[in-house]
Image (cartoon, coloured by chain):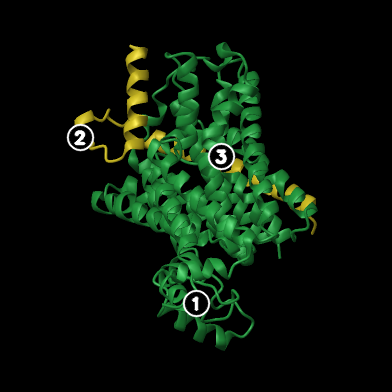
Amino acid sequence: MDGLTVSFVTVIVTVFISLLVSAIVKLITLVLGKFTKPQPEASPDTDTLLFRDQADIASVIAIALTLKK
Amino acid sequence: MSWQMFLSAFQGIEALLHSSPQMVVARFGLIFLGMLLIYLGKKGILEPLLMIPMGLGMAVINASVMMFDPLNLHGGLGTLFLEAQAGSGPDSIKNSADLMYIMGIDWLQPIYTFTFSNGLIACFVFMGIGSLLDVGFVMARPFLSMVLALFAEMGTIFTLPIAQHFGYTVKQAAAISVVGGADGPMVLFTSLKLAPELFVPIAVVAYLYLGLAYGGYPYLVRLMIPSAKLRGTIMPYDSKASQFSSGQKMVFAVVCCVVLCLLLPVAAPLLFSLFFGIVIRESGIKQFEQLLSGPVLYLSTLFLGLTLGILCEANTIFDPKVLPLLLLGMLSLLLSGIGGIIGGYVAYYCTGGKVNPVVGIAGVSCVPTTAKVAQKIVQKDNPHAIIMQYALGANVMGVITTAIIAGVFCSIIK
């Protein structure tokens, strides 16, 4: 198999598997959404942020929530 | 004291005198590059976790070459760090004996043999990354994340035929093109499976460029999205990601892991490691989560950086076969960045302008660096624009997509 064929087959298979994963996600979300209670909002002091990346992400989301209000 | 005695006392200088002038220049060049990486890591321009150990390793390995070559592989020159070629000859009995002999001499050889050459370190890094991933961002918008991640694989797809044109075999070309997935552990894993003979240069090139690409991506984004207004497009904040319970996220991780391993058993160790990290995070076992996201991830990253630096010996890097790799690695990452932004534009137009096109760069999967890069660019143009939650979705999906592509490569290329 030459490079072009491998690339072409890879695109087809990857798109198929990615669609499958996305569909599984949607299905899980729909099915579990029907049977589980909504998640209570986590209070900020219950989670200890251990890593800089997590802290960065959390701070950006906190800003977004503030702006929303 | 004779000249010979002087040289015996200072073996580093003796080794320099026994090297060709080009190799001496190359060695000093790499010592300087190693020091530069340490400086850029300290300044925060490049990822310090990787660049500081890698830079020191690179500088030191090129300074510590001496007249020592027990396996007669390098014309009488060698080091006491590790021998990547030990045990790679055609005679399996001799290989085992050589490997055992070298393991008793080179201090990093056990780390290299038992964690690098079998992909264990890549799996450890993936377990750590998994334990930091919040799949809620993917679950909130799976199709948008998937589209962005697929476009950001453009480098992987297009570099393969280009690399083959450069004279590499399909297996080697595939291993090189995975650099475009911008996922270090995946590059290690694929090159070990498909082109173990190019494992060292591919891994070194990949990690060097990953550091450089993140400094370069903001320029690429500004070039391809020249309008500051467009870059500052506000995306509505929705709290979908935080609505998913840990149980739902666990179900997603378990089902995806089993389905993907069923479809791509070749990539199962890596897929398992990633989803194992996710499952541990969502299971609520704090002790395991802290173990994976702390000691396991950071110890693996430390030895990964250090060993990659040690592998940057001038003889390895300045191999004529390796030089085109420098170009192809850069091309692959550049094309992936371009593809990601094209994906961002596609999402922007398909949603009637609701998606900020900058979010596309986060489809290039290095969690969470590219997501942070995207957020930083957007916030510079519009302090009120928050795209982090969308960017993280694309980012996490990017990891999964790269794993799928690596698995497909390993499965279909025989």
Q: Which residue, given by chain and number where applicable, does mark 3 sit on?
A: A23
Residue B114 horizontal side relative to residue B323, left or right = left
Name the residue furthest front.
B1
Discs 3, 2: same chain: yes
Instruction: Check disc 1 and report its element: helix, strand or loop.
Output: loop
Q: Is residue B19 above or below residue B365?
A: below
- Of residues B271 and A53, the one nearer the viewer is A53
Instruction: Check disc 3 and report its element: helix, strand or loop.
Output: helix
* Residue B8: image location, x then y, percent: 44, 76
Q: Say which amino acid is labelled 2.
A: Thr
- The label on residue A46 is 2
Find chain A in the image and tell me its colour.
yellow
Name the residue furthest bottom.
B93
Q: Say which amino acid is labelled 1.
A: Phe
* Residue B152: image location, x then y, percent: 61, 37
Residue A50 horizontal side relative to residue B204, left or right = left
Residue drawn at x 39%, y 71% is B107
Q: Chain of mark 2?
A: A
Within 10 angstroms of label 1, few (less than 14), some, or many (20 or more) residues? some
Find chain B in the image and tell me its colour.
green
Which quadrant is home to the C terminus of chain B?
bottom right
Q: CA distance from mark 2 to mark 1?
A: 57 Å
Q: Say which amino acid is labelled 3.
A: Ala
Q: Which residue, given by chain and number where applicable, does mark 1 sit on?
A: B68
Quadrant of res B372: top left
